């Protein structure tokens, strides 16, 4: 009894085997989770594995999950988009009469100014993505807002139709 303080050697062996089985039962869920994670990593690391193969093993999102994801983008994406596209919708009908009256522009020149609004988005989307990657979404949003403000000032003070189309 002196060495183990738990009775006879046989009792100690039974006690430790019971203790080991309890500890194995406690670690079984953790082991299962770890094995599942390893399987997912192996699936992703397979050569030639496609996203659809990996996506097939993932759970599907519920409507509430999708709504939560979409609502998380509201402040950074949807609300500013409403203002930008709303402003474009207000500006486009005003451009031809303004260009005729102030700059004595013909239809082709006022059409150039109106199409420059769309072309700006085409040419500036890729550099804008690099700006977001470098500065982050919040700081690039401030930079974009300041650029829109300065563009409005340049457009209001434009001396000719070509500077108006660049603004």
Image (spheres, helix red, strand yellow):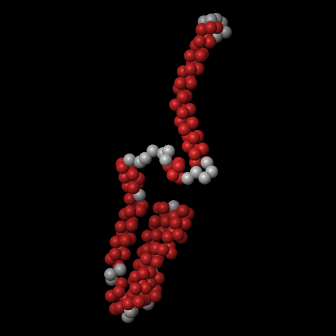
Residue 99 on image: x %, y %: 37, 88
Above or below residue 106? Residue 166 is above
Above or below residue 3? Residue 150 is below
Identify which residue is drawn at 38% across, 71% down: 84
Which residue lies most toward the bottom here? Answer: 104
Identify which residue is drawn at 34% across, 75% down: 89
Residue 154 on image: x %, y %: 44, 82
Residue 45 on image: x %, y %: 61, 48
Which residue lies most toward the right here? Answer: 3
Residue placed most toward the observer, 146 or 15: 15
Above or below residue 87? Residue 67 is above
Residue placed most toward the observer, 35 or 26: 35
- Point out the image quarter for the C terminus: bottom left
Residue placed most toward the observer, 37 or 135: 37
Identify which residue is drawn at 45% across, 44% down: 59
Query: Relative to residue 29, is residue 108 drawn left or right?
Result: left
Above or below residue 91? Residue 16 is above
Identify which residue is drawn at 33% across, 83% down: 94
Report which quarter residue 36 is drawn in: top right
- Point out the image quarter for the N terminus: top right
Asked if one can make out residue 5 in the rendered structure from this viewpoint, the answer is no
Residue 151 on image: x %, y %: 44, 78
Query: Relative to residue 102, is residue 25 drawn left or right?
Result: right
Report which quarter residue 3 is drawn in: top right
């Amino acid at each position: 009894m002196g060495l183990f303080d738990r009775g006879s050697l046989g009792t100690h062996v039974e006690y430790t085997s019971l203790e080991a089985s309890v500890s194995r039962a406690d670690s079984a869920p953790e082991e299962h989770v770890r094995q599942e994670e390893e399987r997912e990593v192996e699936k992703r690391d397979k050569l030639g594995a496609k996203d659809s193969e990996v996506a097939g093993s993932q759970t599907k999102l519920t409507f509430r999950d999708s709504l939560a994801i979409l609502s998380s983008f509201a402040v950074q994406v949807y609300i500013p988009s409403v203002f930008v596209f709303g402003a474009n919708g207000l500006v486009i009908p005003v451009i031809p009469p303004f260009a005729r009256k102030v700059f004595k522009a013909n239809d082709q020149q006022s059409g150039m100014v109106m199409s420059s609004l769309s072309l700006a988005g085409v040419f500036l989307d890729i550099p804008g993505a690099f700006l977001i990657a470098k500065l982050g979404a919040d700081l690039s949003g401030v930079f974009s807002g300041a650029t829109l403000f300065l563009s409005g000032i340049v457009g209001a003070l434009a001396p000719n139709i070509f500077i108006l189309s660049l603004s």
